Image (spheres, rainbow, N blue to C red):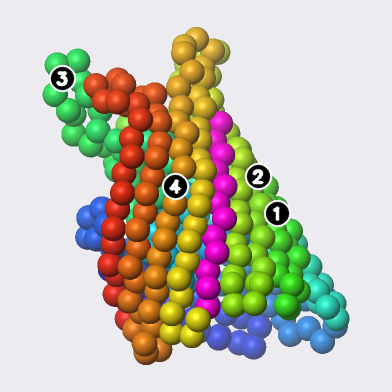
Amino acid sequence: GAGIVGTAQLTPALLALAEIQFQTTDRPTVSVLEAYLRYRPVALSRWRWSVQAGAFFPPISLENDAIGWTSPWTLTPSAINSWVGEELRVIGAEGHVEWRGDVNTVELRSALFRRNDPAGNLLVDRGWSLSDLTSGLGSRLREPNATGGDGEPSPASRYDPFQNIGSRIGWYADMEWHAPGLGRVNLMRYDNRADPAAHTASGVFAWHTWFTAMGASTDTGPIRWIAQAMDGATVIEPTDGVQFKTGFRSAFLLAGWNRGQWRPAVRIEHFSTQGWSDAGTPQGEHGNAITAALNWRPRDWLRLTAEVLRIDSTRTQRVDAGLSPASTVTQVQLGVRLIY
């Protein structure tokens, strides 16, 4: 794969940014991850403000801050940030206010957006996933294979995760505190306000999805600590008076060691979903994952990474496919990245 970010300082206060990726994790695609205009006038006081409009990631992750929604610590993001990269994108406008003190800084952000109505579909149909697949505008996400009554698998269906289904406007609000030498803490509330009864002619539903996310990072000597947690739910109403609701939550702790050219990192995490309807048996999953990565950067333009990822999970829907509900998977990857 490949990713590129282009910026243009059109005026001292106006910035244009576009981020494009080429990815082959699912199938070869070229897509736009972000594209927006930001207006931020020069400020000489402690207060500074800005507005931006376009398509951009919500300010959730303290882990994925490199080109292409990637992490400088691991090849595979956490379950939380894997899902954000796949199904969440803000297509709208955000306002930002910042207060810069002598020791610390406080930032407040809030946005209104459209075209994120299917967000939550993957968590219900597939569950949490740890993957470096990042969706761009115009992507077609692959849903799990369905099995028909004749026992034959049906063709895998795909859908656009960034589309309007209904006419509602979503929002989020985020607050962050950070200080040099101490770290940062952020708290965010997201609600796409989708109409759970709305759907397209092809059967793609608007999932009303909301969650609270919290993150923190700090350094103790050469070790960077990053923690993040998310708790929320998503709902659809396929017929009048019948709702299907799925609660979801996940949390992780990452420790990364800065040793010059070498950067070892370890991440542990837990994830779960719990689904129920007005009539039906509860279904869901729970699991844990541990990731160990060793990064070596002998040159500024070259990064080599070895990673081992182990996932232990139990998911009730596997029984419907004739599988054991419990699963243990280990993945080993070697990665080479050229950075310019």
For residue 309, say whether it is visible.
yes
**Callout 3 secondary element:** loop
The image position of residue 140, as x and y in percent, is 31, 48
Point out the tag, 1 or 3, that comes first from the N-terminus.
3
Residue 212 image label = 2
Separation of disc 4 and disc 1 at Cα?
24 Å
Task: Give the residue at mark 1.
Answer: 187
Task: Give the residue at mark 3.
Answer: 151
Task: Give the residue at mark 4.
Answer: 289
Separation of disc 2 and disc 1 at Cα?
7 Å
Identified at 45% across, 31% down, the residue is 285
Query: Which region shows up in magenta?
Result: 246-258
Amino acid at the residue labelled 4? Ala
Identified at 52% across, 43% down, the residue is 270
Quadrant of the frame with the N terminus: bottom left
Point out the tag, 2 or 4, that comes first from the N-terminus.
2
Q: Disc 2 vs disc 1: Cβ atoms closer than 8 Å?
A: yes
Residues packed near mark 4 inside 10 Å, few (<14), some (14 to 19) or many (20 plus): many
Q: Disc 2 vs disc 4: Cβ atoms closer than 8 Å?
A: no
Furthest-top residue in this view: 279
User: Is residue 275 placed above or below 225 in the rendered structure?
Assistant: above
User: Is residue 66 placed above or below 284 in the rendered structure?
Assistant: below
The image position of residue 234, as x and y in percent, is 54, 33
